Amino acid sequence: MPLINPHYGLLPGSYLFSEIARRIGAFSEAHPEKKILRLGIGDVTSPLPDSVVQALRRAVEEQSGADGFRGYGPEQGYAFLREAIVRDCFPDLGIRPEDIFVSDGAKCDLGNFQELFDISCKVAVTDPVYPVYVDSNVMAGRGGNRRGDGFSGIIYLPCHAGNNFVPTLPKTRPDLIYLCYPNNPTGTVLNRKELQVWVDYARAEDCIILYDAAYEAYITSPEAPRSIYELPGATEVAVEFRSYSKLAGFTGLRCAYVVLPQSVRGQGADGEKIPLAGLWLRRQTTKYNGCPYIVQRAAEAVHSPAGKAETSALVRGYLDNARKIRAAFEALGLTVYGGENAPYVWVKLPEGLDSWNFFDLLLDRAQIVGTPGAGFGPSGEGYFRLTGFGRPEATEEACRRLLGAGRQTLFPGRI
């Protein structure tokens, strides 16, 4: 029989959100009469913007005639979308349409990008961390041994209240550094000075920063950059990942893109400096046939004046939800982070209450689903994530339930 990749055996028994779904299923089976409010997994709930729907309809009509039919598209994405992205998102930042690689999701891109690098490359991640950064590298063989809630081969950069959720430079040099800002799960951001430290470090140490900017549209602070390329030197060391999922409701439609300047390079076995853009294109053309034409037309509509107004309204609505959730937990006397420049709210739990126990408690006492911080890495224990992606009425009902359950039911004797 064929041997199984042994690195898969190092992963936890189930993906974080699969375990959450299992627990919800068990509770629903036992209590079918109780309505569950889901503020856990970061899926959106608002319908697609009208400009996006109209663009989809027009593109579908095109596909119905011989003159307008499109089959396989350009490997990097259609020029109309790549040009719109550069014009709208990266003016005067040195990014060109040739640097844009359109795909069907940032999660896929972030999981796949590590394939460009040798198995010996050391990986650093902020902790807590979005699971795909760690799990995809473990699958590839860079994880080392399972160690408590982490892996011996991964360099963890703790982010917690003690350091204001700002990661400190590692003592051991990594080859690849995953940064996500606005951060999932903590909802925090780095200001320009704090992020410049990482760009300067990567340039000095010949590292590559894999920068997840999926939530950049939620930034309200003028001190926080929306793109890493706003910082001097970033086009030499950074790859940026963006998505239409949380900006325009594309979680089911699927469209994202990688920004990869030609100046970002790795090193060949002979010491030659090799642009990563050519390798990524080779990888994508081998394993991927591109985002559908109709979806790319829908994404193009996001960058139109009407699309920008509609998506801004969506973002404001989700941020408003997040602020309400934050206020409800603060009213219970808890310390809360996020919910201002991100759709995520990161709650510090009372001493002695672990995050999976609180998940079960919140589900049982208030029928609200969140995400245990422990699922995001060692430094996530003692915290709990909720999202602002629910419908406004569901969010308001969840806040009423939280305040109704109150200190005596949810946190008896703890706060």
Image (cartoon, rainbow, N blue to C red):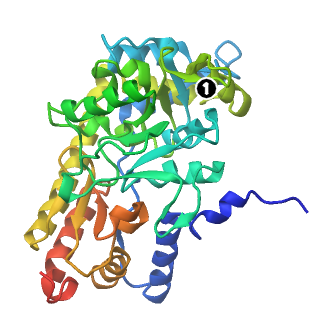
Residue at 34% across, 63% down:
380
* Residue 331 shown left or right of residue 97 in the figure: left
Q: Is residue 37 above or below residue 228?
A: below
Where, quadrant-wise, is the C terminus in this rendering? bottom left
Residue at 71% across, 16% down:
66
SS of the residue under disc 1: helix
The residue under label 1 is 280
Q: Is residue 371 visible?
A: no
Residue placed most toward the observer, 159 or 12: 159
Residue placed most toward the observer, 283 or 127: 127
Q: Position of residue 306 (x, y in %)?
A: 30, 24
Q: Is residue 89 visible?
A: yes
Residue at 38% across, 76% down:
356
Q: Amino acid at mark 1?
A: Trp
Residue placed most toward the observer, 399 or 188: 188
Q: Quadrant of residue 201?
A: top left
Q: Is residue 32 above or below residue 161?
A: below
Q: Quadrant of residue 241?
A: top left
